[in-house]
Image (spheres, grey):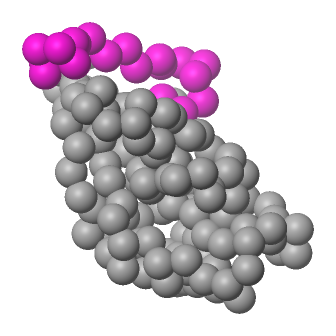
Amino acid sequence: MQGRRMSSTKICSGREITPVFFGTALGNFGVDHMLDGPVEWAPAPMPRNTDTREVTATEEKFTGFVFKIQANMDPKHRDRVAFMRVVSGKYEKGYEAASGAYRQGDVVISDALTFMAGDRSHVEEAYPGDIIGLHNHGTIQIGDTFTRAR
């Protein structure tokens, strides 16, 4: 199958072709193919419903939602990281965004992270479908949304 072009429709339908990736994160072998494959072949992120409207990936203003919180990711520190998926717009470092309904006021997202195996790096920008990590001191909860669209 190597060298043959496959349509994203066939791949994403799961009925004719199922991509299988081999590799190991410990040896950093095949990881790039596993991460780049879905980006190249998968459809754009689906719209997300909110209490008041539907948010689509094509909107210009930044919106993201927290889907996971992980504690003790760094054995040297007792940290907590909230994982947020960007749904629309573009995240840029230092964005001020309105957050979930239980919190008053805006939050500055100044120090977002991305992860690859055991490495962390700071994120300058992120796009719909990207997942970024936010330092969390107990103020962010699963299900929180952050948006620049009001």
The front one of 85 and 7 is 85
Identify the residue at image location x=54%, y=18%.
Answer: 16
Q: Check the picture and name the quadrant holding the N terminus.
A: top left
Residue 58 visible = no
Residue 13 colored in magenta in the image: yes
The front one of 60 and 118 is 118
**x, y (%) of residue 7?**
42, 37
Identify the residue at image location x=32%, y=37%.
Answer: 77
Rendered position, 59 above or below 113? below
Identify the residue at image location x=58%, y=63%.
Answer: 64
Rendered position, 119 above or below 139? above
**x, y (%) of residue 88?**
55, 69
Identify the residue at image location x=52%, y=53%.
Answer: 137
Q: Quadrant of residue 50?
A: bottom right
**x, y (%) of residue 43?**
52, 48
- Main SS, magenta residues: loop
The front one of 35 and 13 is 35
Magenta-tinted stretch:
11-29
Left or right for 80, reference 139: left
Left or right for 1, reference 139: left
Report how many numbered discs are placed on residues in the image. 0
**x, y (%) of residue 123?**
27, 61
